[in-house]
Every structure is written in structure tokens, then in C-alpha cells.
Image (tube, rainbow, N blue to C red):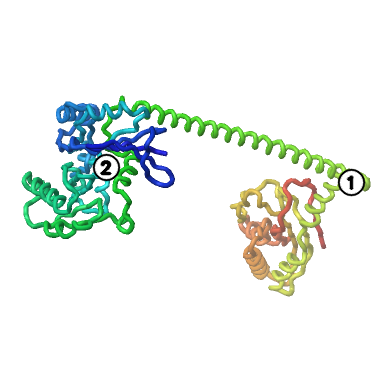
Amino acid sequence: MKYVLYLSPTERQLWGRDGQGWQRVSGEPRGHVWVVTDLVEESFAAIRTPRLFGRDRTSYIARQLATRYPDTPYRSFLTPDQEGDLIGRIAPTRYILLGVDAAERLDAELDATPNPVAGLWPISMLLALLGRDRDLPPDLFLVLPGPGTLRIVFLKNRTPVLTRLTLTPNQPGAQVDEIVRTLRHLENTQVLPRGRHEHPVLLLADPGGLEGPMAAAHLTRVSLPRWEATPPDDWLFPLFDLALKSPVGQVAPLARRAEFLAARLSKASLVLAVIIALAGISGAANNLWSLFSMLNESRQLDASLQQINARIAEVERDIGKFGVAPETVRRAVALHDEEIVSAPPMEPHLRLIANVLAIDPNLRLKELQWRLLAPGALPCNVTVAPDPAAAGAASPEAGSEKRKVELAFELAVPVSYGPRDRAQILRNISGQLEGLAGLTLWQDANKDLASGSLRGGSVLGAATKLSWCMTLPGIAGATDGPAGGPTGVSKP
């Protein structure tokens, strides 16, 4: 249960709130006490300060509080909403001072309270906080009737300006007259403009009998939407609930609240210690779980390793039954892939030569040689590796070297052909060969004929052997296999 000590001009009431709501308490409280005052000595005062920061601003406001309320330590200040730019919000120049100038009464009441005091809030401040609700007008009268009293708080732009507590009988006419008297004071001090304007009033009581006199005095009754359907049994209860939240406007000095603040700090420290302990336990549990997971994974890996070793031993036993070493089988497979499977068929290449020789049916093939070159072997009896660009072949990319097929053939030309016919036949054959995609011509009878002519020797002597030698692309071959001799077929 939480306790509120309510101090009015005539009585002292202790209230407690439990799960069933607020109720009067006759005995001593058994916990912290929140104090709410409803005294005549409550007041507000607006001040303006230079634009100060930090300790300078705090010291200046403290001096202003001591000047305005020199006889009471029950004083504080609040910062209303500021107008202007960002610097006006960072370093405000408008403040509202509030205090309860009844130090003797409050000291006696708090000394008589054996329990720690959570704080002291004037009811004027709680009413001002209630009136800052966004559903209410910014300029507002808040009226709280009591037994033979009337509390009036006026807000301008949601900032408290005036508070009054009057001895007013609980009669509608007298209460409205007191509100109007407060309104005339505000007009005389130029807080409100004169004129027949409608002024909103939040009446925290049963409006029975007040609506007619209020309408005649141009006072408009407003209400809070959340309490419009079901108003509270006593309007002090919402104010007590607000005090339990420890809002701004607390005026008790620090010495009166030291025990409460120490208990709260101790509770916060205890909560923090529990959180740290739980975090440590959670971290230890996570580490322990990780350790168990690692041990479980280790056992699983050991079991898998044993299964793999068992399978390897079984495979080795099966291999031993064949009587052949695994390395011999591996070499045989590599030889099959490199020398047998990689050999291209002869038919496409022979068909290519037949198509070239079809240009003249009188030509005869004297000799044909076809062989598969080993990786890196030089074709056509060349002793020096030529530049691929000079030989008319593109440089192979790394890892994409192809095995080549060497194809060489020699022709027999009829003896009835003269030198011109012979030269024309050689040019036609060489031209067709050079136009084939992927073919590289290493020996050319046409060029040999031209070379013999340039040297001035006999043409027949220089080109008696009409032969061509070329390489054709085969299929990809293993570059790391044994560099054996070429596989070849020769036909006369």
C-alpha cells in the first residue's frame, strides 16, 4: 500500500491506496509517505533571467528563490515551454517559482511523521499539471471546491500564473462570484484582456446548480474526456495518483527526503546487482552449454573417424584380393585417358584432305602421314619452337592447351602438266588449306616452289617433292602425363 498525507488548512488526513482504490487510514503508515498540501500560503511567481548556462543559471535561480521565499525552505521552480529558437530551449530565460510559505506548519507535520517522506507537492502544482492535458484549452481556470473552501488555479498558455484558496461556502452563487473576482483581478493586472469573452473552467466537482450562474458570467465549463463518462468519486484521488508518480514541482528540501532517496538508491543497487548476477549466471550457463556442445561434437567426430578408418581398412582388403597394386591401376587408367581416349578419329581429317584434292581429279596421293603429337612436341620435324603469332596460331590460354594432330601428305602431279599448271595447282591447294579453321601450315609446297624460283634455280629441282605438313586441333590432353612418343599412322 502507498500512502498520501493530505494537509488542508483545517485538518490532516492519511490516505492509502491498495488494489481496491483509495481509503482513509486511521493508524500509522507502514511505508513511504507522499505529502500533498492544500494551504493558503501556496503561490506562483514568474521570473525572467539572463541567458545563463550550467552552474551560473542554477545559482541565479537559487538566489531568486531565496529572495521570493526567504522564510521557507519548501520552494522550487519549473521551466515552462519556451518560445523562440533552439537556443531559447537550451538556455531558457522564463521560469516559474513556487513555494509554500508555511514552514512551521510543515516542519511540525513532517516531524510527526515517523516514516520516510518521498516528497511534498502543493496541490496547486498538481492541478497545474492536470490542466496541461492536450485535450484542454491552453488558457484555463481549474476550480476544486472543498469543505468550505475553493481552490482556483489559472493557467495561461498551459503555464501556472495564479493560485488562490478562499473560504467560500459551498453555494453555487458564492463559488461563481469568487471565480469572477479572480477573473477581474487577472484583467486588472493585464494577464487577460477585458471584454465579454468566454473563459473555460475545469470544475473538479459535481456541476449541479453551477451551470446557470457560470453561463451568466461568460464562464464555459469544460471536462477531461477520460473522466467525462465516469467521474471519480473524489477529485482528490486523481491528484493523489499524480503525486505518487513523483512529478515536477516537489518542494521539500533534500534533508527531508534523504532516507527515501537512500532507500530508492539501495533498491536500484539491489536490482542492478540482481541483473549483474543473472547476466553472470546466464554467461556461465552459455559457456557450460558451449562446452557440452564441443564435447558432444568431439565424440561424434571420433565416431565418424572410426567409421572412416573401418571403411578404409575394408577397401584395402578388397584391393588386396585383386593382386594388383593400386599405383599400377592408377597408371593404367592415366595411360588409357591420355593415349587412347584422347586420340581423335582419323576420318574427319582424311575427309578434309579428300575435299582439298577434289579440285583436280588427276592428282594422286603418293604418301600420307597422320600422327597424334604428344604435349609440347614440335611438329613436322621443326627443330626450334616458332612464335605462335608468326605461325598463324593463337596463343593458348593457361590450362587450355589442346593435343594436336600432325597431318603430312605428298602429291604426284601428272607429267603432262607444265610449270604454270603445276604452280596453279599448288596455289589452289595451299589457299584451301590456309582457309581451314584451326589449321596451322608448317610445310607448304607452294612456298617451296616460290623459294626455288627466287633463288634462280630450276623450278622442277626446287619443288620435285610436292609435300605439305600441318597441325590440326585434337581434343584436350593431360599435360602432366608421360611425354611418350607420338601415336601415328603412315600410308604410302
Q: In this view, does 390 lie to the left or right of 303?
A: left
Residue 187, visible in the rendered structure: yes
Q: Where does the image place residue 349, in percent across and percent down from the top left?
A: 73, 64
Residue at 24%, 53% in the rendered image = 136
The circle on residue 126 is: 2
- Say how many tags the image has: 2
Residue at 79%, 40% in the rendered image = 303
Q: In this view, does 326 lie to the left or right of 24?
A: right
Q: Which of label 1 and label 2 is nearer to you?
A: 2
Task: Give me the C-alpha separation between circle 1 and circle 2.
Answer: 96 Å
Residue annotated with mark 1: 319
In the rendered view, would you say 179 is above or below 434?
above
Q: Where does the image place residue 194, in percent across and percent down from the top left?
A: 6, 52
Q: Label 2 amino acid?
A: Leu
Q: Label 1 amino acid?
A: Ile
Residue 90, visible in the rendered structure: no
The circle on residue 285 is: none
In the rendered view, would you say 129 is above or below 137?
above
